[in-house]
Image (cartoon, rainbow, N blue to C red):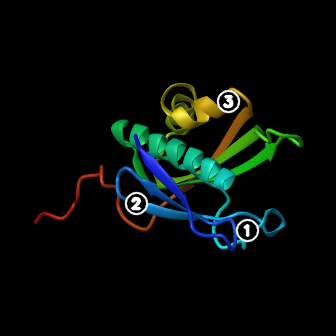
Amino acid sequence: MEAKVSWTGTSGMSFLAETGSGHAVLMDGAPEGGGHNLAPRPMEMVLLGTGGCSAYDVVLILRKGKQDVRGCEVKLSAERASTEPKVFTKIHFHFVVTGRNLKPNLVERAIALSHEKYCSASIMLAKTAEMSHSYEIIEDLTLPSEHEKSSDPE
């Protein structure tokens, strides 16, 4: 994996990050650190990446388990050390998983597998941060399940 991060100029603390897969993202610092608050902070990007990594795993595991998952969001709350280096010390993941007839034990298992085996980001951050998670399931009744046979004779 490769990436490049370039300072965008002398009038602030913005950085353009370019990924090896060809995507770009802007990061900026807080005004008290010389930034202009134009984009997420680098540590916010670390937190976002961790949430994305874990949500990706949860959706993939539920799909492989033949669960009719239709939505997954993870709300993260984190605490950081008060002194340098200001590493994450606590991170809580709250998953909101939407679908049809989702089995709570499979949702819980998918989250546990993500945190214990698959999500490199959360496993790495667990070296400094106390990790916790919770979840809720929302039943989606808007469309028939993709796993149910249609009663339409056509």
Q: Which amino acid does label 1 sit on?
A: Gly
Is residue 105 visible from the viewing direction of this image? Answer: no
Q: Where is residue 82 in the image (x, y as percent from the top left)?
A: 89, 43
Disc nearer the start of the sequence (3/1): 1
Camera-near label (3 vs 1) is 1
Name the amino acid, label 2: His
Mark 3 vs mark 2: give the one in front: 2
Q: How crowded is mark 1: few (under 14 residues within 10 Å), some or many (20 or more)?
A: some
Q: Name the residue under label 1.
A: 35
Q: Is mark 2 on a helix, strand or loop?
A: loop
Is 59 located above or below residue 132 in the figure? Answer: below
In the picture provided, is 99 more to the left or to the right than 11?
Answer: left
Q: Residue at x 47, y 52 (%)?
A: 4
Q: What crowding class fits label 2: few (fewer than 14 Cα within 10 Å), some (14-19), or many (20 or more)? A: few
Task: Place residue 80 in its image quadrant.
Answer: top right
Q: Nearer the viewer, mark 2 or mark 1?
A: 1
Distance from label 2 to label 1 (Cα)?
A: 22 Å
Which quadrant: the C terminus?
A: bottom left
Residue hosting label 3: 126
